[in-house]
Amino acid sequence: MRRAHSSRAARRGVGLGLAALAATSATGCGIALGEDTLALDYWLWDANQLLPYQHCVDAFEEENPDIEVRISQYGFDDYWMKLTAGFVAGTAPDVFTDHLSRYPEYVQRELLLDLDALEATAAVDAEEFHDGLADLWVGEDGGWYGMPKDFDTVAIFYNEQMLADAGLTPADLEDLDWNPDDGGSFEEIVARLTVDSDGNRGDEEDFDPDDVAVYGLASQGSGGTSGQTMWSWTAGSTGWRFTDADVWGQEYNFDDPRLHDSLEWLFGFVDKGYLASYEEVGGDANAQQQLGSEQAAMSTDGSWMLNSYTRLDGVDVGIARLPAGPAGHPVSMYNGLADSISADTDHPEEAARFVAFLGSETCQNIVGDAAVVLPARPESTERAIEAFGERGIDVAPFTDLVEAGHTMFYPVTDQFGSIDALMTPAMDEIYIGGRDAETLADLNERVNAMLE
Amino acid sequence: MSAVENPAPAPTSSGAHRLRPKRAVGRRDDTRLALLFILPALVGLLLFYFWPLVRGIWLSFTSWDILTPARFVGLANYQEMISDPVFWNAVRVTLLYVVINIGIQTVVALVLAVLMQRLSRSIVLRSLVLTPFLVSNVVAALVFLWILDFQLGIGNHFLEWLGVGRVGFFTTEAWVIPTIALVNVWRHMGYTALLLFAGLQAIPGNLYEAARVDGASEIRQFFTITLPLLRPILGLVLIISVIGSFQVFDTVAVTTGGGPVDASRVLQLYIYDNAFGQFNFGYAAALSVAMLVILMVVTVLQYRVTRAGQTDLN
């Protein structure tokens, strides 16, 4: 019906603008614009990536004059709502940036096309991306549902001036370690960087934990179910993993004492005065703002935040590696985004050509050169490292862990939405101090029951 | 209609034949015309009220994620609801909100209405009282979120200056519902006061004159004349306010999102979370039906207790 509508418009010789208008009002994807041109809709959520991807689109259109690509960018929360509404109304974009926490449910409902079943994408060699990135997007049915576009890891951003004021140097942040018993050298650094209103530091006797001016560590609240940038690195470096398999696990491990000990240790910083309380920062805590307003000295955050931190006005920000845990080395969550093709598309093969291009060296290099995120292809990642380096930013703390294999994947399972609704309030409660981390064992049974 | 209001003269033998058919045709025409006028409203009523209600009740017996067809599950959603601690917490939190919000709002609005009537005839003053109602709920909520922010809010800086210390208005379990309730008292009190003010106009002024002659104080007049005679309007205002209060959503959604933990997860927000967060539209529909039942019970009780439909003026 959509195709008939737009074809009629084209046959009647209605101008391109009218056809596009009809297309946007009647349909969301795959519009024939004229005899030889059709339009594809492409959605993404990160405003920082809009420009490099527009350059990718320009390069794609140059190579494919029969296809026009229209990019739309929506904020992360609106993005998923609009996407679902699009699927319901049959107006979802042809191609869209997808997230590991969302795609399993789309696959289950047959809303995505298998890239292996389309000529252009099937020709892409998954081995060309960083190890494991393409595997994250292979569904339980063996279909391939996302073309890797970038990856992200976690490291420490810190205020260089505050570090110097504490009598520390960047070298002191190298080879940090932590453990749930005495906190290790990481806790010592956090304590040193914490300052109360009278200027006493967290490692000094007169320090008042109830009257803190600068927290050693910025708060992101509890971090919720995945704790991606807040707590996942603590439990991960004890050897703990979210589920019983890298992807498509059938059981979560929220009942593991290693997780409980890690959470109790990290959230225990609140009582020690090293980390802001929930009362102070609420449920929507913004770590970058805390560093920017000099209310916190350090923050563990993701590589996609590189530009946001390094462009903070009046604050010189350095980057350090995560501390090693009881496992003997640091562990970062390793998350990868990808582009998926909607089953709603009227032009699957053309969409596949575009998606293959998004994963190509040409597009990935464009994104790498823009120094916004770390692209999924190793050679493009090198270009990003170089581009960041030209701006004086050393991103090795983010990339080293990938090379060393010290990463763990974002949990890829069914029912993540329902699991998140159950787990996030519980994590918040632990952060507030109203619940023992051990009680997660009870919730783990309910979570695993959802996966049965 | 005309037959009742304007009795026709006694028909003559010849006129009887002419009049009767004419009057019968006239009634039919009136009915058709009336139906024609009613039709748009009737279509709207059926399409936008009756159909969604029936469909909502039907959906409450299904499992539906909007992306795949709804599946009939019988009473499963209701069984789940009964054993769902978050639902019961949402009921408790919503009731707490309604009691605080309506309790304070009604008293403040009543005082404002009486003051407007007894002390001032100024249109400017009456308009000023109404201005918070002209601000959108979301804007009002965001303004208060910043005013009362723990770190940056001017409200907390003021409290600190007073020596009281900062308060986590939106971030502590004890304060979050009273705070949200008070934000909405601020926003709605002018509107409620205006409704009550309109009710006060219907009370005959000679009653107050007589009371004054008898030496009754302003407070005595309020409790013996104003309050009893305002009861029907007060009852209706309460019914409308309580229904609106039960439906609190936007203020919570933009300030706390239901937190800390579930301390402000009111029923409407829980319905929204299930529908648009987890795409459990069937369960969300069951929660909505539960809310409908709660509101019906509360409204009937209020109507009976306040005798909102009866006036004492006669």
Image (tube, coloured by chain):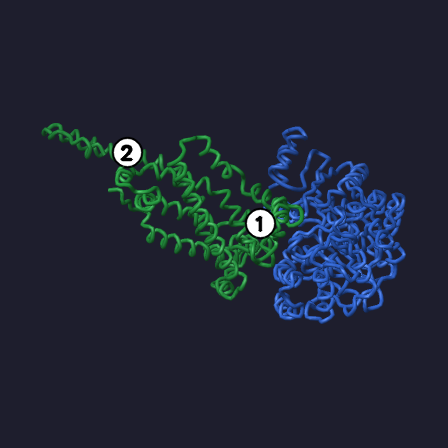
Question: In this view of the protein, which residue sits in the foreground, A2 or A341?
Answer: A341
The amino acid at mark 2 is Asp
Residue A421 in percent (x, y) is at: 61, 59
| Figure quadrant of the N terminus of chain A | top right
Q: Chain of mark 2?
A: B
Count of numbered circles on the image: 2
At mark 2, the secondary structure is helix
Residue tagged 1: B253
The spot of residue B71 in percent (x, y) is: 53, 59
Q: Colour of chain A?
A: blue
Instruction: Give the percent coordinates (x, y) of residue A48.
Output: 76, 43
Q: Residues within 10 Å of mark 1 (few under 14, many from 20)?
A: some
- Determine the residue located farthest toward the left in the rendered image: B13
Q: Which mark is residue B30?
A: 2
Asked whether residue A284 is in view, the answer is: yes
Considering only vertical position in the picture, is A321 above or below B19?
A: below
Instruction: Give me the residue at 28% from left, 33% from top.
Output: B29
Expressed as whole percent of the image width and height from the top left, the position of residue A179 reads 79, 67
- Cα distance between the residues tagged 1 and 2: 50 Å
Q: Chain of mark 1?
A: B
Report the front residue among B12 and A101.
A101
Image chain in green: B
Horizontal placement of A401 versus A257: left or right? right
Quarter-wise, where is residue A270 in the image? Answer: bottom right
Asked if marks 1 and 2 touch (Cβ < 8 Å), the reply is: no
As rendered, which of B137 and A182 lies closer to the eye?
Answer: A182
Identified by mark 1, the residue type is Ala
Between discs 1 and 2, the one toward the N terminus: 2
Query: Quick check: A35 above or below A192?
Result: above
Mark 2 crowd level (few <14, some 14–19, many ≥20, 10 Å Cα): few
